[in-house]
Amino acid sequence: MMICYAIAIALDMNLGLWDEVEAIGLFSGMLILVFIIPYTSLTCRRLHDINKSGWFQLIFIIPLIGGVALLIWMCSDSVNVKNRFGKPVKYK
């Protein structure tokens, strides 16, 4: 996702579509819209793996503390027992 976003920014800058004030361009803006649903659903699924509600991903709105908390939750181990969101999925 980050590689695609970097390419989109480079395209925007080279084609003169990059807005310095808003820090967004045509291609990078479209890419954000394309990736927002998969990113949100994967984050929600990861939070369910640690027995937290998917709504906790909105904690990033709190400056600094929210981003750190979300990062810690994303890096923590999954709950290996059945929780309120279902039984854990084992990937091979």
Image: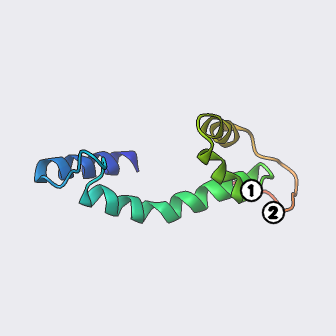
**Relative horizontal placement of residue 12, taking residue 85 as reference (left or right):** left
Q: x, y percentage for residue 9?
A: 26, 48
Q: Nearer the viewer, residue 90 or 73?
A: 73
Q: Are marks 2 and 1 in contact (CB under 8 Å)?
A: yes
> In percent of the image, x 81 and y 52: which residue is there?
51
Query: Badge 1: few (under 14), some or many (20 or more) residues near its Cα, within 10 Å?
Result: many
* Rendered view: 37 above or below 23: below
The local secondary structure at tag 2 comes to: loop
> In percent of the image, x 63 and y 34: which residue is there?
68
**Relative horizontal placement of residue 4, taking residue 53 as reference (left or right):** left
> Residue furthest toward the left?
15
**What label does residue 85 carry, if any?**
2
Which one is earlier in the sequence, the residue at label 2 or at label 1? 1
Identity of the amino acid at label 1?
Answer: His
Q: x, y percentage for residue 69?
A: 68, 38
The local secondary structure at tag 1 comes to: helix
Identity of the amino acid at label 2?
Answer: Phe
**What label does residue 60 carry, if any?**
none
> In percent of the image, x 83 and y 48: which residue is there?
80
Q: Quadrant of residue 76?
A: top right
**Relative horizontal placement of residue 70, taking residue 14 as reference (left or right):** right
> Residue furthest toward the front?
21
> In percent of the image, x 65 and y 35: which residue is there?
65
Which residue is the site of mark 1? 48
Query: Badge 2: few (under 14), some or many (20 or more) residues near its Cα, within 10 Å?
Result: some
Q: Nearer the viewer, residue 57 or 43?
A: 57
Q: Quadrant of residue 33?
A: bottom left
Q: Nearer the viewer, residue 90 or 42?
A: 42
Q: x, y percentage for residue 60?
A: 61, 45
Cα–Cα span, label 2 and label 1 = 6 Å
